[in-house]
Image: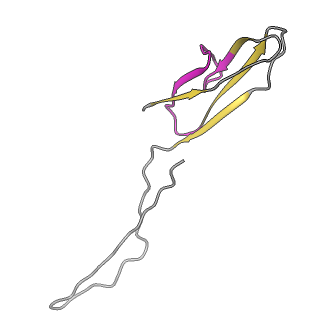
Amino acid sequence: MSALAVSWSSSDNLSGVDRVACKDMSGAAASCTNSLSVTATKDGSNAISVVLTDKAGNSSQPFMYTWLLDTIPPVVTINLRPAAVTGSGAALSHSVWLSREVV
């Protein structure tokens, strides 16, 4: 699976940004300053969080970035079978259209 790079900018007009704390999808602390690269390995919802702390000790609310990983292809099931086709020149046609939303 390919890595997802998430980046951000931060500023504090008074004392300045002192540290950035990131958590990866497992909730473990991850090294980051202004970006984080993660590799999603499980289908479903994934997330990272970022908290900034300024030099005065004030912390921001957590910034959460979530995305959905879907690696499972769709399954087609034909529930209705046409009657048997017999005779000279008989033809049977069946079409299936699949669409997939890109998130």
The location of residue 10, given as percent across then percent down, is: 70, 21
- Rendered position, 78 above or below 52: below
Residue 65, relative to residue 17: is it above or below? below
Whether 31 is among the magenta residues is yes
**Residue in the foreground of this view, choosing between 81 and 14:** 14
Count of numbered marks: 0
15 or 42: nearer the viewer = 15
Q: Residue at x 65, y 33 (%)?
A: 65
- Image: magenta residue range: 21-45
Give the x, y percent position of residue 81.
37, 77
Tell me where residue 85 sits by quadrant: bottom left
Q: Residue at x 83, y 14 (%)?
A: 14
- Identify the image quadrant of the N terminus: top left
Q: Nearer the viewer, residue 35 or 95?
A: 35
Q: Is residue 25 left or right of residue 89?
A: right
Q: Nearer the viewer, residue 7 or 22?
A: 7
Is the image coloured rainbow, by chain, by secondary structure, or in one colour? secondary structure
Residue at horizontal 69%, vertical 16%? Answer: 21
**63 relative to 32 in the view: left or right:** right
